[in-house]
Image (spheres, grey):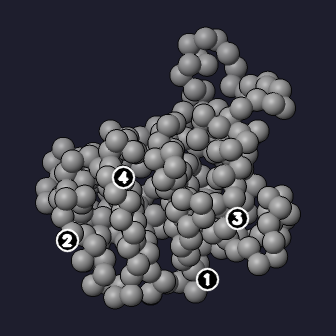
């Protein structure tokens, strides 16, 4: 799978950028990237998101145990790779029919967070049991929602092209061609939103620390992120212990995604 988002839609972390990176291109101005993806996956489907970017999907050469899926529901586009183990309980939780699959569950979970906002995103993600990586683009709000399971079981890379647009793919070779060395694996147990940036859903009260990442050939690329033992900066400055804040049942978490 492949997704490219304009920097006005999704601002990538500065730590992903490698100032010594060479050979990266502007993925939104050149069709080379789509052509290359299609050469690897001849039956690939690509969707132009206008000024927001584009996404591309193919089920070709996939791991049968971790299949890819793509769906669009009410202007919510979702690329999904993996397998959900507790699919039955999630169907019940979100009031979905028996025919609902993994990608429709992810879309409904996102829509529930966006429209009702009755719980934080980390709660919804911790409810998902299995191996997964997904990328959501909501064209109604021009926003993204991206996550990988707690073990990083499904490969997903993210990086920045020559004009700081966000690029995501499960193919490291595509990332290298597009981003040069300004890319790294998407951090496990984390999620990224256009409004809130990168956060850990496994440890939501802790900060993430950037760690330099070296690829398989020994080249220094961007940074990956790990959970720091320090509590969130604002809590530390205020002298507040790291704990889930007390909120009423009507608290609105929608602005946090």
Of pointers 1 and 3, the one earlier in the residue sequence: 1
Of pointers 2 and 3, the one earlier in the residue sequence: 2
Residue sitting nearer the eye, 183 or 37: 37
Between circles 3 and 4, the one closer to the viewer is 4
Q: Residues within 10 Å of mark 4 (few under 14, many from 20)?
A: some
> In the shown orientation, is residue 15 left or right of residue 203?
left
Q: Residues within 10 Å of mark 1 (few under 14, many from 20)?
A: few
Q: Are marks 1 and 2 in contact (CB under 8 Å)?
A: no
Of pointers 1 and 2, the one earlier in the residue sequence: 2
Name which residue lies at 60% across and 72% down: 82
Residue beneath disc 2 = 32
Of pointers 4 and 2, the one earlier in the residue sequence: 2
> In the shown orientation, is residue 113 left or right of residue 50?
right
Residue 216 in view here: no
Residue beneath disc 1 = 65
Between circles 4 and 2, the one closer to the viewer is 4
The Cα–Cα distance between marks 1 and 4, rounded to whole angstroms, is 32 Å
Residue 137 at x, y percent in the picture: 49, 55
Secondary structure of residue under mark 3: helix
Between circles 1 and 2, the one closer to the viewer is 2
The Cα–Cα distance between marks 1 and 3, rounded to whole angstroms, is 18 Å
Name which residue lies at 42% across and 49% down: 224
Q: Are marks 1 and 3 in contact (CB under 8 Å)?
A: no
Residue beneath disc 3 = 105
Residue beneath disc 4 = 52
Secondary structure of residue under mark 4: helix
The Cα–Cα distance between marks 4 and 2, rounded to whole angstroms, is 18 Å
Name which residue lies at 25% across and 58% down: 28
Quarter of the image with the C terminus in it: top right
Between circles 1 and 3, the one closer to the viewer is 3
Secondary structure of residue under mark 2: helix
The Cα–Cα distance between marks 2 and 3, rounded to whole angstroms, is 33 Å
């Amino acid at each position: 799978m492949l997704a490219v988002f304009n920097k006005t839609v999704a601002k990538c972390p500065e730590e992903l950028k490698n100032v010594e990176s060479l050979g990266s291109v502007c993925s939104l101005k050149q069709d080379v990237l789509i052509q290359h993806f299609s050469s690897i996956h001849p039956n690939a489907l690509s969707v132009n998101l206008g000024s927001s970017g584009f996404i591309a999907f193919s089920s070709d050469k996939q791991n049968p145990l971790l299949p890819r899926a793509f769906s669009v529901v009410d202007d919510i586009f979702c690329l999904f790779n993996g397998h959900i183990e507790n699919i039955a309980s999630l169907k019940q939780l979100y009031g979905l029919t028996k025919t609902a699959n993994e990608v429709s569950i992810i879309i409904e979970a996102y829509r529930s967070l966006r429209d009702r906002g009755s719980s934080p995103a980390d709660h919804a993600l911790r409810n998902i049991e299995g191996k997964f990586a997904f990328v959501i683009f909501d064209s109604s709000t021009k926003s993204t929602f991206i996550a990988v399971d707690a073990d990083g079981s499904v490969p997903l890379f993210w990086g920045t092209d020559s004009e700081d647009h966000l690029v995501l793919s499960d193919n490291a070779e595509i990332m290298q061609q597009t981003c040069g060395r300004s890319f790294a694996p998407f951090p496990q147990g984390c999620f990224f939103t256009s409004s809130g940036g990168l956060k850990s859903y496994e440890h939501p009260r802790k900060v993430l620390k950037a760690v330099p990442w070296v690829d398989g050939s020994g080249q220094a690329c961007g940074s990956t992120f790990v959970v720091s033992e320090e509590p969130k900066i604002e809590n530390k400055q205020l002298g507040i212990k790291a704990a889930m804040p007390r909120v009423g049942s009507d608290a609105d978490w929608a602005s946090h995604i």
